[in-house]
Amino acid sequence: MIIGIPKEVKTDEYRVGTTPSNIEEFIKNGHKVFVQSNAGSGSGFSDDEYKEAGAEILQTAKEVYARSTLIVKVKEPQKSEYDLLREEHILFCYLHLAPLRELTSVLVDKKLCAIAYETIAVKNELPLLKPMSEIAGKMAPVIGAYHLSFYQGGEGILIGGAEGVPPAKVLVIGAGNAGFNAAKVALGMGADVTVLNRSMPKLELLNKALPSVKTELFSKELLGKELLDIDIVVSSVLIHGGDATPKLITKELLSKMKKGSIIVDITIDQGGISEASKPTTHTKPIFIEEGVLHYCVANMPGAYPKTATVALTNATFPYVLELANSGLAEALQNNKALASGVNIFNGSVANHAIAQAHGLEFFRLYNHQLFC
């Protein structure tokens, strides 16, 4: 297999699809690897390190895409990359296609195989989303606390309070990996933390680990009540299967929230939790709607690329190696988790949630002659 690692071009994205240590293993297994020059520089990996690992450095993305079959990235292709994609490609990266109709159409038209990290599922776990969810969850209370500062447009409340002054109130919506880590860090910063979730099992686990955190079963009525007095909202609602995030915080609810409070919308990749949510960047992370700050950075872990790249590639490496060693057909036939990650295949949408989101026909992958 010829593996290509292009430099990320999404705004403020400095992660990279693989590390030099991963490349050593690809080379040992007989594969060829092309890496675009400076692809890893933002994550602390030089071209020389990739060369020493056995990769060949190419100067442009055009060369990498033209000479490679398996394209391993971090974020979804940007418009500048659309013309570089071709039918022979296996694209392996985060895609988050539910809110991205144009990209979905491009990938269908290209007739390539697009495998999304975020929809690879092992039972009820999403192993390639988990490391980035952990990082985003740990970041969220820190970001919220910083932007509560009066000089950042916030209401001027210190997250941990002070003697005789109560701490900030933090509401975490969702008790999965991101939500757990957000609650843990917020609690460590001295906040008054409440977590809402739709089912009890995760709340019970969270209660055992973090007994000082208040937990409640989610309802729209309870959410509306909680939002009236909250300083930081962390949205970590996870919808399995690639579907869009439900808009739980309406414009009406926003108007009732405290002015200068903040929503840290981890779920923005899937559309976001607020009706006002729209993607922002690390350079310009905040906008204000109804007096409420919205932090909607679509690649939150990219703020810490050295940590995030290693955490991500530790998780993706076995899947990349299996695709390379076995080839696409055998890898998908033998690994149901990997097959569950296929979003686009041979000109069809192979993910039900994405097909539904865009009003497109759903093609069940297992009906393809590949599996017959």
Image (cartoon, rainbow, N blue to C red):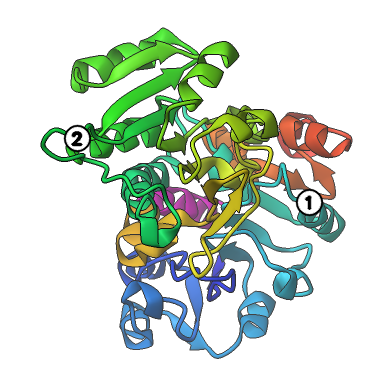
Quadrant location of the C terminus? top right
Question: Residue 165: which disc?
Answer: 2
Q: Amino acid at mark 2?
A: Val
Name which quarter of the figure residue 276 lies in.
top right
Highlighted range, magenta: 314-328
Q: Residue at x 41, y 42 (%)?
A: 133
The foreground one among 334 and 339 is 339
Residue 138 is left or right of residue 208, and the answer is right
- The amino acid at mark 1 is Thr
Residue 161 in picture, x, y percent from top left: 20, 39
From the top left corner, tell me how far across and down residue 331 is, in percent.
Answer: 56, 44
Q: Quadrant of the N terminus?
A: bottom right
Q: CA distance from mark 2 to mark 1?
A: 50 Å
The answer to whether 360 appears left or right of 290 in the picture is right
Q: Residue tagged by mark 1?
A: 104
The answer to whether residue 372 is seen in the rendering is no
